[in-house]
Image: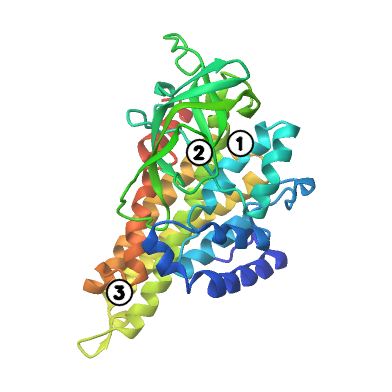
């Protein structure tokens, strides 16, 4: 089906970004993937390209309000090129919206120019060793001490944990209230060079090798009160407000990886000879890829509609849950089928399908598990 959400400006951007990937990322990607993180130079190059400043006001060096369609194009082109954008999406798609929505003018002057230039790489620290989807159970504390807060606690599964310059951190500024478990949580922007901040283990994951995921700890870390983000005690509502965009990003990524898997598999099955003819000539191959293409079309139509709703500031939490659940489940099925058509070579990492397979599995977990998505959708049905 013809996609109708892109215009000539978007097509020009796609060509430009594809050239950037071919020139600056594809040759370096194996080295970066092996070391387990993107160098800061990668983000500075993205900053010079102008894509680190989406939605950042022009007066702070950004591009101003920007349609999510541009980030969607970047996600699609990276998947087709067989590379990833590392933790670009964490800095610009997850953390930056907190700064844009909650930072006061003085904070924006300090933080946003560096973000737009790619000089400042960010992370968000929510999850704790005993706290996953239940954010109300957060135990990291922030105690007021004069013109500072003192943070103590530990976080895990922190994407970009070892490379970030600023880390938006959720901490408890008031004791747990049994009648309001969600209250008493606050957001702080922590400078990762602060005394007492420590990066622990870099977690060895099944996939997403280009994205560092770490344990971090706070031992009497003194954070200036001027680095409190938003109002004290209001963090839970802030976290909920940003989740639809995050889940849209994951849904768009599911479509991008599924599309890339189909393209890689088409190329492989046309070239691979079995019993004297291409694998693509067998009816089973044709039927499997036809199923994959149909599933992708359904999910892509849903995601494209959600992108337009996001542009109109009308994307709801339920809309995003529908997209994330459907698209990530679809991607898992499609990529698995495509790997099967590669035979034994599909299990070898030099083939892009192997990395897609490993990278995609976590999309049904992070940003809210599929079970959480089903709970949100069920509630919208009155259940």
Mark before the other along the chain sequence, 1 or 3:
1
Can residue 179 be seen at all in this image of the molecule? yes
Decide which of 170, 261 is in the foreground and name it.
170
Badge 2 crowding class, 10 Å Cα cut-off, few under 14, some 14 to 19, many 20 or more, is many
Horizontal and vertical percent for residue 374? 39, 36
Mark before the other along the chain sequence, 2 or 1:
1
Decide which of 298, 310 is in the foreground and name it.
310
Above-or-below relation of 269 to 71: below
Residue behind mark 3: 285
Residue behind mark 1: 98
Q: Quadrant of residue 235?
A: top right
Above-or-below relation of 96 to 30: above
| Numbered disc in front, either 1 or 3 | 1
Decide which of 340, 358 is in the foreground and name it.
358
Badge 1 crowding class, 10 Å Cα cut-off, few under 14, some 14 to 19, many 20 or more, is many
Q: Are marks 2 and 1 in contact (CB under 8 Å)?
A: yes
Mark drawn on residue 124: 2
Q: How many marks?
A: 3
| Numbered disc in front, either 3 or 2 | 2
SS class of the residue under badge 3? helix
Q: Is 113 left or right of 283, judged from the image as shown?
A: right
Decide which of 65, 332 is in the foreground and name it.
65
Mark before the other along the chain sequence, 3 or 2:
2
Horizontal and vertical percent for residue 364? 37, 46
Question: What's the distance in space between the residues labelled 1 and 3, CA to CA?
Answer: 46 Å
| Numbered disc in front, either 2 or 1 | 2
Question: What's the distance in space between the residues labelled 2 and 1, CA to CA?
Answer: 10 Å
Above-or-below relation of 303 to 336: above
Horizontal and vertical percent for residue 383? 41, 25
Q: Is 114 left or right of 23, judged from the image as shown?
A: right
């Amino acid at each position: 089906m013809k996609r109708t959400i892109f215009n000539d400006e978007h097509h020009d951007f796609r060509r430009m970004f594809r050239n950037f990937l071919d020139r600056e990322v594809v040759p370096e990607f194996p080295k970066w993937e092996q070391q387990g993180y993107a160098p800061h130079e990668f983000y500075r190059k993205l900053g010079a390209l102008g894509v680190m400043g989406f939605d950042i006001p022009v007066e702070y060096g950004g591009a101003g309000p920007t349609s999510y369609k541009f980030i969607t194009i970047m996600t699609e082109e990276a998947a087709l090129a067989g590379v990833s954008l590392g933790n670009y999406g964490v800095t610009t798609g997850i953390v930056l919206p907190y700064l844009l929505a909650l930072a006061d003018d003085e904070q924006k002057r300090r933080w946003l120019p560096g973000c737009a230039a790619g000089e400042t790489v960010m992370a968000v620290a929510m999850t704790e060793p005993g706290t996953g989807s239940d954010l109300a159970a957060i135990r990291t504390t922030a105690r007021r001490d004069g013109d500072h807060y003192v943070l103590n606690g530990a976080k895990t599964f922190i994407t970009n944990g070892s490379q970030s310059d600023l880390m938006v951190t959720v901490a408890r500024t008031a004791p747990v209230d049994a009648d309001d478990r969600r209250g008493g949580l606050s957001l702080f922007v922590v400078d990762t060079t602060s005394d007492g901040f420590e990066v622990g283990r870099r977690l060895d994951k099944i996939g997403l090798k280009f994205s560092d995921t770490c344990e971090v700890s706070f031992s009497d870390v003194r954070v200036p009160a001027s680095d409190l983000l938003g109002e004290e005690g209001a963090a839970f509502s802030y976290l909920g407000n940003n989740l639809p965009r995050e889940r849209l990003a994951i849904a768009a990524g599911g479509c991008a990886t599924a599309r890339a898997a189909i393209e890689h598999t088409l190329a492989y099955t046309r070239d691979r000879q079995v019993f004297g003819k291409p694998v693509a000539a067998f009816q089973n191959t044709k039927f499997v890829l036809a199923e994959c293409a149909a599933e992708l079309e359904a999910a892509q139509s849903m995601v494209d509609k959600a992108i337009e709703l996001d542009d109109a500031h009308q994307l709801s939490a339920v809309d995003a849950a529908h997209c994330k659940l459907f698209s990530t489940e679809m991607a898992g099925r499609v990529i698995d089928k495509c790997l099967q058509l590669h035979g034994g070579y599909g299990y070898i990492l030099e083939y892009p399908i192997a990395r897609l397979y490993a990278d995609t599995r976590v999309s049904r977990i992070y940003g809210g598990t599929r079970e959480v998505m089903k709970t949100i959708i069920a509630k919208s049905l009155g259940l």
